[in-house]
Image: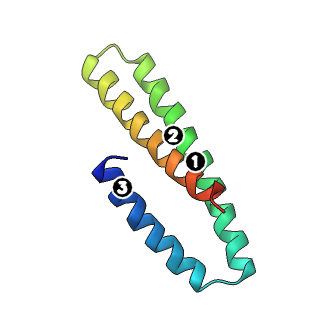
């Protein structure tokens, strides 16, 4: 894992651990629902950005939206990681 991703992971872990320390079972269920929603929302955004990139004839637009789609996919992977951790 590169340094930037490692730092993102550490920050997100601290946030999540703090949330879980303050929560009860209901909050944990809400937390899991939010993570599921975020994974789906990020993936929908990837699809939307890729559709724009695919339809554009301008290289700068195509490249920009492809890059944005990759970033959103990365976000989805992080949320999925937290969702699947036990």
Among the two numbered marks 3 and 1 on one chain, the one whose residue lies closer to the N terminus: 3
Alpha-carbon neighbours of circle 3 within 10 Å: few (<14), some, or many (≥20)?
few
* Image position, residue 49 (x, y; %): 45, 32
Of helix, strand and loop, which one carries label 1?
helix
Disc 1: which residue: 41
- Residue located 47% across and 67% down the image: 13
Of helix, strand and loop, which one carries label 3?
helix
Question: Are the residues tagged 2 and 1 within 8 Å (C-beta)?
Answer: yes
As drawn, 65 above or below 4: above
Disc 3: which residue: 6
Alpha-carbon neighbours of circle 1 within 10 Å: few (<14), some, or many (≥20)?
some
* Image position, residue 42 (x, y; %): 53, 45
Q: Residue 7's image quarter? A: bottom left
Q: Gap between marks 2 and 1, in whole Å?
A: 6 Å
Q: Residue furthest top?
A: 57
Question: Are the residues tagged 3 and 1 within 8 Å (C-beta)?
Answer: no
Disc 2: which residue: 45
As drawn, 74 above or below 65: below
Indicate left or right for 61 with 30 as reference.
left
């Amino acid at each position: 894992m590169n340094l930037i991703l490692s730092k993102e992971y550490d920050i997100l872990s601290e946030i999540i651990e703090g949330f879980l320390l303050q929560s009860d079972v209901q909050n944990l269920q809400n937390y899991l629902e939010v993570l599921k929603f975020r994974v789906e929302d990020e993936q929908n955004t990837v699809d939307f950005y890729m559709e724009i990139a695919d339809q554009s004839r301008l290289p700068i637009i195509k490249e920009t939206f492809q890059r944005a789609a990759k970033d959103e996919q990365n976000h989805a992977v992080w949320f999925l990681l937290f969702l699947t951790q036990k």
